Image: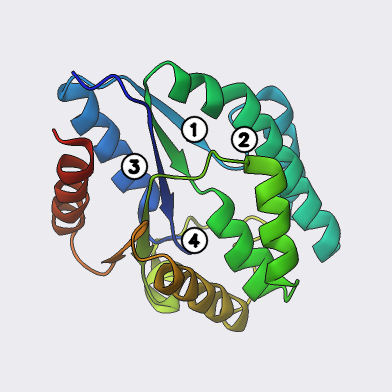
Amino acid sequence: MNSKGFFITFEGIDGCGKTTQLELADNFLTASGRETLVIREPGSTPLSERIRDILLDNSLSVNPVSELMLYIAARAELVNNAIIPAIAAGKVVLCDRFYDSTTAYQGYGRGIDVTLISQLHRLTVGSHSPDLTFLIDVDYETSLSRRKLTADRLESESEEFFGKVRDGFVKIAEAEPERVVVIDGGKTIESIFAEVRHWLETRLKI
């Protein structure tokens, strides 16, 4: 069994199906003998979960810069208290969203300088960037059709906003093709996971 830790993230606009693919990947890796840690952003530590509640609260109006800094604070907690120890222990870390979402949502979506956001990523994450990222790409109509009836604060944003976010994810993938694997999220769950599984087998040598 490979004892080297590995860090995988799942990205895409709301309703893309990334959480389902993460769960399937976890089942596959566990069955293959790898120890995993499943986490989400923001969240997965006591402080980060409290920050998550604030960020998704539909009753709150949050300034874009405040929103950005809350995500950064939640990530700092997650990296130091969950990701670093798990990687050191040889686990495969599976994270539902990570810093690409901040670049896409707060950078391209909100219009905050992406260079500044990249600097904050370096401060927060250091050398602990994802080894592999799956971007599950869907259009706005597909995203909307898959969401729950009660939308949180981010899910309530406009079609124009989500168009900017999706374009941001595509730009990220184009800039880092060695890390980011783009998968058509309009396919069936089984077809999408077949691609995810191929990359897991290839990169983790399963």
Separation of disc 3 and disc 2 at Cα?
16 Å
The answer to which of marks 2 and 4 sits earlier in the sequence is 4
Task: Determine whether label 3 and label 1 are within 8 Å by CB.
Answer: no
The residue indicated by pointer 1 is 39
**Residue 106 appears at what percent x and percent y?**
69, 65
**Rendered position, 63 above or below 94:** below
The answer to which of marks 4 and 1 sits earlier in the sequence is 4
Say what amino acid the circle numbered 1 marks. Answer: Ile
The residue depicted at 58 percent of the width and 67 percent of the height is: 104
Q: How many marks?
A: 4
Task: Determine whether label 2 and label 4 are within 8 Å by CB.
Answer: no
Say what amino acid the circle numbered 2 marks. Answer: Gly
Say what amino acid the circle numbered 4 marks. Answer: Asp
The residue indicated by pointer 2 is 43
**Residue 14 appears at what percent x and percent y?**
49, 61
**Residue 71 appears at what percent x and percent y?**
71, 48
**Rendered position, 198 above or below 87:** below
Separation of disc 4 and disc 1 at Cα?
17 Å
